[in-house]
Image (cartoon, helix red, strand yellow):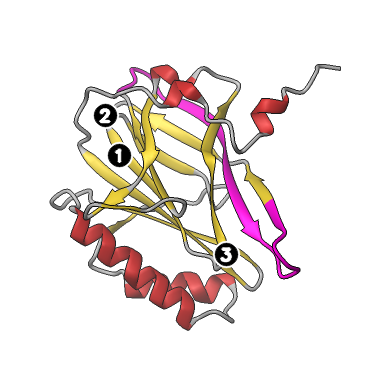
Amino acid sequence: MAVIDRDAFDGAIVQQELEGVCGLTPTQTQLSLIAQATNGFVVMHGSDVGREMFDDAEISQIFVIFAETVNDFSTADASTLRTAVSAALAGMWTPCSGEMPCPFDQAAHGRTRMIFHVHVPGWGFEPARIKFKGKDPSGSFCGLDWLTLNGENCKPYSFQLQTKPVEEPETYEFALFIKSSQDAGDQATGIIIDPALELTPP
C-alpha cells in the first residue's frame, strides 16, 4: 500500500507550482459561487463570455447579489436556492451550461481567469485553497492568489487561478480546501472537496 503524502492533505501548505506568474492576459473570467442549502452544496458557474470582460465593480455586484439571495433563501433546499440565484443573476453574467457529475466540476479553456468564492457563514478557504492531483499542474495553471477587488483583499472568501493554453483537452482532478466553523465554541473543520476540471484549447 502506498504511503499517503500528509502535505497533500494539509490545507496550510500551498501547491507551489500554481503560484508562478502567468505572463499571459486572460481572455475571459469564470466565476464559481459556492453556498450551502439545507440538503447540500449549491455551486453556480458563470462567465463573461459574449460580453465585455468583468471589471471589479461587476464582480463585486455579482458577489453582493449572490450573498443577498443566499441569505434570503437560507432555509431553502438546493433546487430552490439554485433557481433563486439563477433568477437574481440573470443578465449579469453568462451562465455555464452542462450537467457535471459533481456540482463543483468545471469546464474552462486556456487563458481563463477562474475565481472561486464561498458564501457560507463562518466558512472560508484555507491557505492552500486548491490543489491538483495526479498530474503536474504547472503546465496548465498559474497565478494562484487571493482575489483583490477595488483595492480590497477578499481573503479567505475568494481566490483566483488562471489557466494556460493547452493543445489537447485534459481533465484535472483537484481538491478545494475550506475551513468551516462549528457551533460548539471555536472548533473548525477542514473540508476537502474532490471535483474535476476539464481544460480545452482556447
**Closer to the N terminus: mark 3 or mark 2?**
3
Q: Classify 158 as above or below 76.
A: above
Q: As drawn, which residue projects farthest toward the right?
A: 1
Residue at 70% across, 53% down: 189
Specify the quadrant that holds the C terminus.
top left
In which image quadrant can residue 174 be found? top right
Foreground pick, 78 / 115: 115
Q: What stretch of residues is rendered in magenta?
A: 165-189
Whether tag 2 and tag 1 are in contact, CB under 8 A, the answer is: no
Element on which disc 3 rests: loop
Q: Nearer the viewer, mark 3 or mark 1?
A: 3
Horizontal and vertical percent for residue 99? 49, 51
Element on which disc 2 rests: loop
In which image quadrant can residue 67 be found? bottom left
Q: For residue 175: magenta?
A: yes
Q: Amino acid at mark 2?
A: Pro
Q: For residue 188: magenta?
A: yes
Residue topped by disc 1: 113
Q: CA distance from mark 2 to mark 1?
A: 12 Å
Residue at 40% across, 45% down: 159
- Dot 1 surroundings within 10 Å: few (below 14), some, or many (20 or more)? many
Q: Classify 99 as above or below 24.
A: below
Residue topped by disc 2: 202
Q: Amino acid at mark 1?
A: Arg
